[in-house]
Image: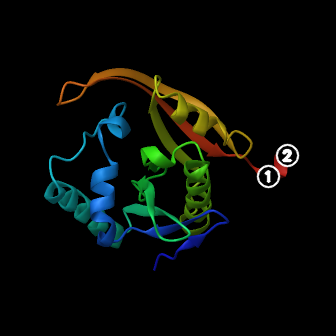
Amino acid sequence: MLRVIHTEKINIAPFEMKYLLDYYHGFNHEITKFQWPDPFENSDDAKNMLSEFLDEMEREETLLFSILSKNDKFLGSVEVHGLAGECPELGVWIIESEQNKGYAYTALREVLNYVSAKYGKESFFYEADIRNISSTKLLHKFRNQYEIMERGFEKITTDSGKMLKLQGYILKAKNEAKN
């Protein structure tokens, strides 16, 4: 059973459908500008996708967490996909009005620690559009705990016509004994 992770500024809780509309409204054009997914057409589309993620969580294939303020306001989400594989994929986003407050870093750090401890994972895949400076800065905040290795770069046109310039990275946990 997943638990709520409490930090000084935020809580990271397994996603619940009570945050459906917050997720739907927050996952807008600005948030998705440099991502493969597009904003949802309607709240039913959001509900369907999130329901699929929740089903995957029950099978321990995916983790989907809400990032919440101390008073339970939805701030964004952090996700881990492909838990069965050797190198799960990370995702994180914060609603526009709450960006640049360190929430994404804190949430990702805590979830990485959790996944490492519970599932024994040491490597993670992270992908960001090279024009998304905030995502790249976030990644490099982990350089003391993880070796960050560039992987494939691809220019992709999504189904909706967005042109993305995606850089993949592998984060590999540094062996503490070496430090």
- Distance between the alpha carbons at the discs numbered 2 and 1: 5 Å
Residue 17 in the image, given as x and y percentages of width and height = 29, 70
Give the secondary structure at mark 2: loop
Eyeballing the image, is 29 above or below 21? Answer: above
Give the secondary structure at mark 1: helix
Please report the residue visible at 51 percent of the width from the left and 77 percent of the height from the top: 3
Q: Amino acid at mark 1?
A: Glu
Left or right of residue 68, residue 19 in this image: left
- Residue at the disc numbered 1: 176
Crowd class of label 1 (few under 14; some 14 to 19; many from 20; radius 10 Å) = few
Eyeballing the image, is 84 above or below 130? Answer: below
Please report the residue visible at 38 percent of the width from the left and 67 percent of the height from the top: 15
Q: How many marks?
A: 2
- Residue at the disc numbered 2: 179
Q: How is the image coloured?
A: rainbow
The answer to whether marks 2 and 1 mark residues whose Cβ atoms lie closer than 8 Å is yes
Residue 95 in the image, given as x and y percentages of width and height = 42, 48
Q: Tell me if I can see residue 59 in this picture.
A: no
Eyeballing the image, is 84 above or below 35? Answer: below
Q: Which sits in the foreground, 161 or 115?
A: 161
Left or right of residue 2, residue 44 in this image: left
Q: Which sits in the foreground, 116 or 14?
A: 14
Crowd class of label 2 (few under 14; some 14 to 19; many from 20; radius 10 Å) = few
Please report the residue visible at 27 percent of the width from the left and 68 percent of the height from the top: 55
Residue 40 in the image, given as x and y percentages of width and height = 20, 47
Eyeballing the image, is 128 above or below 67? Answer: above
Q: Tell me if I can see residue 67 in this picture.
A: yes
